[in-house]
Amino acid sequence: MTIKTVKDAINDALVQSFEEDKNVILMGEDIAGGKGREQYQGTQDAWGGPFGVTQGLYTKFGGERVRDTTIAEAGFFGAAIGAAMTGLRPIVELMYVDFAGVCFDQMMNQAAKVRYMFGGKQKVPMVVRTVVGAGFRAGSEHSQTLYSLYTHIPGLKVVAPYDAYDAKGLLLSSIKDDDPVIFMEHKRLYMTSCEVPDDLKPIPLGKGRIRREGSDVTIIAIQRMNLFAEEAANELEKINISCEIVDPRTYSPLDEELIFQSVKKTGKVIVVDESNPKCSLASEISSLISEKCFSDLKAAVIKITAPHTPVPFSPPMEDFYIPSTKKIIDAVKKLKDV
Amino acid sequence: MIEKQKINWIYKKIFTIRFFEERIKKIAKEKTVPGYLHTCIGSEAICVGVMAALNQDDWISSTYRNHGHAIAKGCELNEITSEIYGRKTGICKGRGGSMHISDFSKGMLGSFGIVAAGPAVVLGAALQEKINKSYKTCVSFFGDGAIHNGAFHEAAGLAKLWDIPMIFVCENNGYAEATATDWHLNTKELSDITKAYDMLSYIGDGNNVFEVYDITKKAINEAKQKNTPIFLEFKNYRFSGQYEGDTQLYQPQEEIDKAKQNDPIKLAKENSSKYGLNKNDLEKIINEAKEEVDKAFDFADTQPWPQPEDALEDVYVNYPVEINR
Ligand SMILES: Cc1ncc(C[n+]2csc(CCOP(=O)(O)OP(=O)(O)O)c2C)c(N)n1
Ligand SMILES: [Mg+2]
């Protein structure tokens, strides 16, 4: 048992996957960084991506399998698809999910459609690792989450781990998975840590996790929102309100059963999502609950999301944009009185 | 011959940008300002040389590395600093931050954080100018890394096909993030990529502000005369890291030392007497630039923060408001 950061847990999962399967490769911009300058000892891995997550991989596994690309996302995403169809297990890094637009077609129309459209004869075992999230003062083009953009599309799997344990376990299974997986890493979570067993087994996609058992209100929290849900639950415990926190962890597939069980228990639900509200994971989960658990509900589901705006830069506005512990506490109190 | 006024303007701007970016480096170290900061130390001559060939209402697009472009294009220093500090009186009301400094009234069509997003936008502005028989010059700034992106190539192809007299300005500063330009280049010269579009291109010394000015001015005339886009590659060196805080381990010291010999500020100083500036003139300009920059940072520090709810303005489609609050 070791304490690991999310960043190191992801690096561990990558190293382990590279060691287990020689068909695993990694492509992205500056995932090594400085690789052309091998005469300068120790600088080949100068970057490891902007957050240093892939540092050391180039040195361990070489430039054939760890490839710095040009800023040509449509090109190397497409290449990953072809490589995946013919035997490799490529992992591609989309430096920030905000750049999804420049290579979205490859995911939406090629990667996602191949297995279905060609009569189930072909699989595309690739993983897109990407960085999401606000709270970094990074402005409108480097702070989005866009979970639902990918979740909307049949043929793509979507994973968004909260802690280091889940990050490692879910990345291991994402790489082993035979279909395209979008693996979303939250930039504000990289340096958070928890215990991660060295021999952690892959965590199956489609299995959520109860992060806290409770009886009064269910809080369904998406990725970083688990942090605020936990803080809110701790506060509320002091006034004898018991919250259950459900972390779905993967959004396609979604562990609907786990969610429904909790709703049946409490009858009161809050969904917390850092994304914009329209057609979001929050609206999707809340609509599923209304449809499947209507008679169990004691009140309408409450969604706590970002407003319907791009992510603003300035701290007071960005802090307002991101759902907060206080908003969760207020919502729980409102429900408690129902 | 360049008129005296323009020479003074060039000197004032080039020093202003250098002082500005040095101040940014300082506040980045002190961590007194939120967010990503991309400085352009080493690019001053390109920013100023190109802009010297433009009118205030000519159009440009910029990138996340935009401070120099914004200053040279005439954006108010106070509004730039206030934006970087996230204040309400910032050039984008604190919504954009350092990566998106843009004043449309000064001919900026946006500073985009997505690599290679600018050229096609400028192509559109140039198309508008053509359709409306107006003759504003349209210039897109981008880096050596951007030329690998499809969006650049699609814009280049259309610009040539439609006989659009826009100027592509590629700032070849030797690096795209941690990747040196030549590690990823398939051609001998970067500007050789324009051969695919049969587009005119010129290479210039991006450290020499007067050469940049000269080449740009000629290119604008030629583009308009021949109704054709022109690609300009200016070579310089990125003394700044990709962003403030970058360790820059991949940039060898010998390389930096060598590049320093051609530092655009050093060259400008050395050339000053050739352009009719005596020691006193130069000193006066330098002091003025420094003072204005210092004032702008002091100003930003006193400016009010936006209200949290200001985030909800300018969205033009709203969502049930009680959910937002
Ligand atoms: C489409 C896209 N991919 C990747 C990035 C991340 N990124 C930001 S700057 C940069 C390097 C750009 O280098 P260059 O074009 O040479 O400009 P410079 O920073 O040197 O001015 C990269 C890869 C991005 N912003 N947009
Ligand atoms: Mg560059």
Image (spheres, coloured by chain):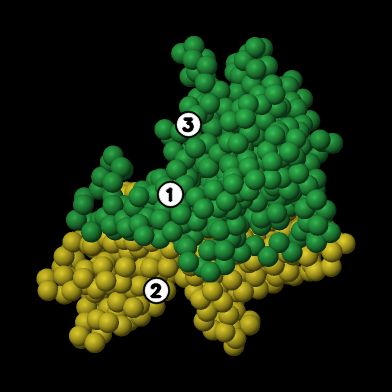
Chain colours: A yellow, B green
* x and y percentages locating residue A321 in the rendered image: 34, 58
Compute the Cα span from label 2 to label 3: 44 Å
Q: Quadrant of the N terminus of chain A?
A: bottom right
Discs 2 and 3 carry the same chain letter: no
Say the numbered circle drawn on residue B78: 1
Answer yes or no: is residue A214 visible: no
Contact between marks 3 and 1 (CB within 8 A): the answer is no
Q: Residue at x 51, y 76 (%)?
A: A192
Identify residue type, mark 3. Gly
Discs 2 and 1 carry the same chain letter: no
* Residue at image mark 2: A227
- Which chain is home to disc 1? B
Q: Nearer the viewer, mark 3 or mark 1?
A: 1
Identify residue type, mark 2. Leu
Q: Residue at x 52, y 79 (%)?
A: A193
* x and y percentages locating residue A152 in the rendered image: 42, 48
Q: Residue furthest right?
A: A39
Compute the Cα span from label 2 to label 1: 38 Å
* Residue at image mark 3: B107
> Local crowd at mark 3 within 10 Å, few (<14), some, or many (≥20)?
many
Discs 3 and 1 carry the same chain letter: yes
Asked if the beta carbon under badge 1 is closer than 8 A to the nearest atom of ligand 1, the reply is: no
* x and y percentages locating residue B210 in the rendered image: 71, 33
Secondary element at image label 3: loop
Compute the Cα span from label 3 to label 1: 18 Å
Total marks in image: 3
Q: Quadrant of the C terminus of chain A?
A: bottom left
Q: Nearer the viewer, mark 2 or mark 3?
A: 3
Q: Residue furthest left?
A: A338
> Local crowd at mark 1 within 10 Å, few (<14), some, or many (≥20)?
many
Secondary element at image label 2: helix
Of the pair A19 and B197, the residue shown nearer to us: B197
